[in-house]
Amino acid sequence: MADDGTKKCYICGKSESSGSSLTTLPCCQTDSSAVEVCKECIVNENNSVSVEESNRFKCPNQKCRKMFTVKVSGDLEKFVRLGKCEMCQTNQTIVTPDNRCDKCLMGESYRFKYICKRCGKTQLISHPMWKYAKSARKFGGSWSCRVCNDYTNWMIHPDYVKDVPVGTFGTL
């Protein structure tokens, strides 16, 4: 939204007052803000990754990137694809063109170090492992340890606790 209160396209900056018809992306809508895109950008920007996905549209918000199917009318419908996440290797709803689930996508934005319960070594994990633990001082969630060469439980490193989004411990 512009300073004068008019809505603007997140991609090109055109306002509704200039005749652009804006679509609110349901993935990034909150009570106080929304990512809105004009239909011209949905059709022109159609930032798909292959010919097979030529009717796909990725949210332009870098922290989201959820995908939508573009209908003939230009409207968006949430794209749902089930499969094996390339990062965590679990069957999930795939939300990115490179076959990652929403948790791994979130982990890309919150890359923290964790402590292995078995060997005590730290490892950078791009997955929100803190969400599996009841608190910052608890182990939770299973991930592969490069030292133990096995799946173990993890606790977030104390240096990263301050960066965890408020209220998200133990939410999985």
Image (cartoon, rainbow, N blue to C red):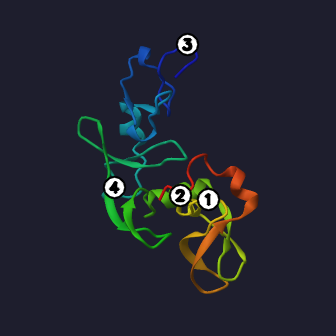
| Image location (x, y in percent) of residue 118 | 65, 82
Residue 93 horizontal side relative to residue 15, left or right:
left
| Residue position for label 4 | 53
Looking at this view, name the residue that lies furthest to the left: 72
Cα distance between the residues tagged 4 and 3 = 37 Å
The mark that comes first in sequence, 4 or 2, is 4
Above or below — where is 56 with respect to 45? below
| Residue position for label 1 | 135
**Mark 3: amino acid:** Asp
The mark that comes first in sequence, 2 or 1, is 1
| Image location (x, y in percent) of residue 168 | 55, 51
Disc 2: CA contacts within 10 A as few (<14), some (14-19) or many (>=20): some
**SS type, badge 1:** loop
Residue 4, numbered label: 3
Residue 114 horizontal side relative to residue 159, left or right:
left
Q: Nearer the viewer, residue 166 or 48?
A: 166
The mark that comes first in sequence, 3 or 2, is 3
**SS type, badge 3:** loop
| Image location (x, y in percent) of residue 154 | 62, 71
